[in-house]
Image: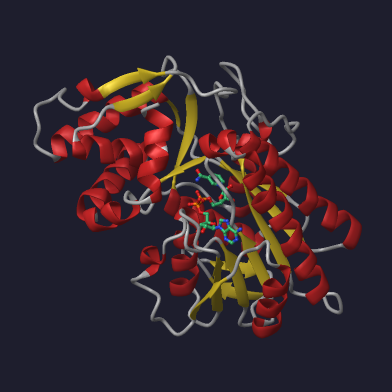
Amino acid sequence: MGLAKHLTGTVKIHFNTMAQTIIITGGAGFIGSHVVRLFVTRYPEYRIINLDALTYAGNLENLRDIDQLPNYHFEKVNILDTAALEMVFSKWNPDGVIHLAAESHVDRSINSPLDFVYTNVIGTVNLLNTAKHHWKNNLEGKRFYHVSTDEVYGALGDTGFFTEETRYDPHSPYSASKAASDHFVRAYHDTYQLPVVISNCSNNYGPNHFPEKLIPLFINNVITGKPLPVYGDGLYTRDWLFVKDHATAIDKVFHEGKTGATYNIGGFNEWKNIDLVKLLCRLMDEKLARDTGSSEKLITYVKDRPGHDRRYAIDATKINRELGWKPSVTFEEGLSLTIDWYLQNTEWLTHVTSGEYQQYYDRQYHK
Ligand SMILES: NC(=O)c1ccc[n+]([C@@H]2O[C@H](COP(=O)([O-])OP(=O)(O)OC[C@H]3O[C@@H](n4cnc5c(N)ncnc54)[C@H](O)[C@@H]3O)[C@@H](O)[C@H]2O)c1
């Protein structure tokens, strides 16, 4: 254990101050790309290996600004390919793994649950096995960090919060597959003493978010004048966190979290979907200099998603109390930054909304 300057400039304890080699899986995706950027730029002495299969959700354009830096490396590997995982571990000899690679979209999990079992459950076990095998002679200074979701806890009524002790009660194939992966990670800690840590986070939003998820989908649809499809009565409630704040939380948990522990990460920021959409419409009318209320006219209610959880809300006091983490931006600030990013990155949006995505979109909303 040693000391290092970190985050706010105050002296904090790192679990390992040696120059580290870290494999970040899913680093070409939405959250993963922000985590890779943060680690590559904040820790120039580390080697950061982005391991990603580049599915429809993975996009190396997300990392164009940092991909020439000497401490960034990319390996195109599917976590279902155990031989390739072994090769990458032998080549880089990592001290840490931050595991974000996953199938992540609930609607897709309803259409193709097995894809979620393969990547989220079997892929995670493959990664655990590879780390266990590779680190078998020396677990000192090693860390396997599994990034998960608050959706494993199921749904809340009008009150209450998910804590780290809340019983798992997943309702969608996506959340069931993430719950299973969390259980395997804990089992590898308890059975084989693999030094793991887990975090469960609420809904993220921000730049580079694939436009099948609510906020980027609606920004894109307002820009192009398409309907805004709101599920059911629009009263579903979610806790939203700016993606860069999730990345700083991941940094904290990776370096300072207790081995074997779980940390809930959230924004203390609950919004009913319809209120969020109205705020987004108001901000977009201002930014696009359109008449007030013109974007709201695009709202259309569509048939509800099966098994739709009514409300999620995270109690993030543990990570705040133990690791001193809290979100850095308000929702209105984060949403405004996000809209600005999409308005300035139309080329990115055009690239990711062509091809396979277009067919998916037509199936999902125009049936
Ligand atoms: N987006 C959220 O709001 C949110 C909230 C809490 C937790 N999470 C979790 O964070 C992680 C990242 O989420 P995201 O929204 O960035 O997802 P994403 O779908 O944007 O990115 C997933 C990445 O994983 C890669 N990938 C998928 N299957 C793979 C495989 N078999 N092998 C290797 N790479 C593969 C994809 O190419 C992509 O780059 C996921 O584990 C998700 O469960 C997401």
Looking at the picture, the colour scheme in use is secondary structure
Name the quadrant of the N terminus: bottom right
Task: Specify whether residue 210 is in view.
Answer: no
Horizontally, residue 251 falls left or right of residue 88, namely left
In the rendered view, would you say 21 is above or below 61?
Answer: below
Image-quadrant location for residue 123: bottom right
Residue 265 position, x and y percent, is 57, 44
Which of the pair 350/334 is nearer the observer?
A: 350
Q: Is residue 96 something that shows in the picture? A: yes
Q: In the image, is 271 to the left or to the right of 261?
A: left
Displayed quadrant of residue 150: top right
Q: Quadrant of residue 225?
A: top left
The mark tally for this picture is: 0
| Image point (65%, 43%), residue name | 318
Q: Is residue 230 above or below residue 268?
A: above
Where in the figure is residue 121, as x and y percent of width and height?
A: 72, 50
**In the image, is residue 317 above or below residue 142?**
above
Foreground of the two, 199 or 75: 75
Residue 171 spot, x, y in % from top left: 66, 28
The image shows residue 301 at horizontal and vertical percentages of 36, 18
The residue at the point 27 percent across, 41 percent down is 220
Looking at the image, residue 278 lies above or below residue 77: above
Give the quadrant of the C terminus.
top left
Residue 227 in the figure: left or right of residue 150: left
- Please name the residue shown 69% across and 77% down the image: 89
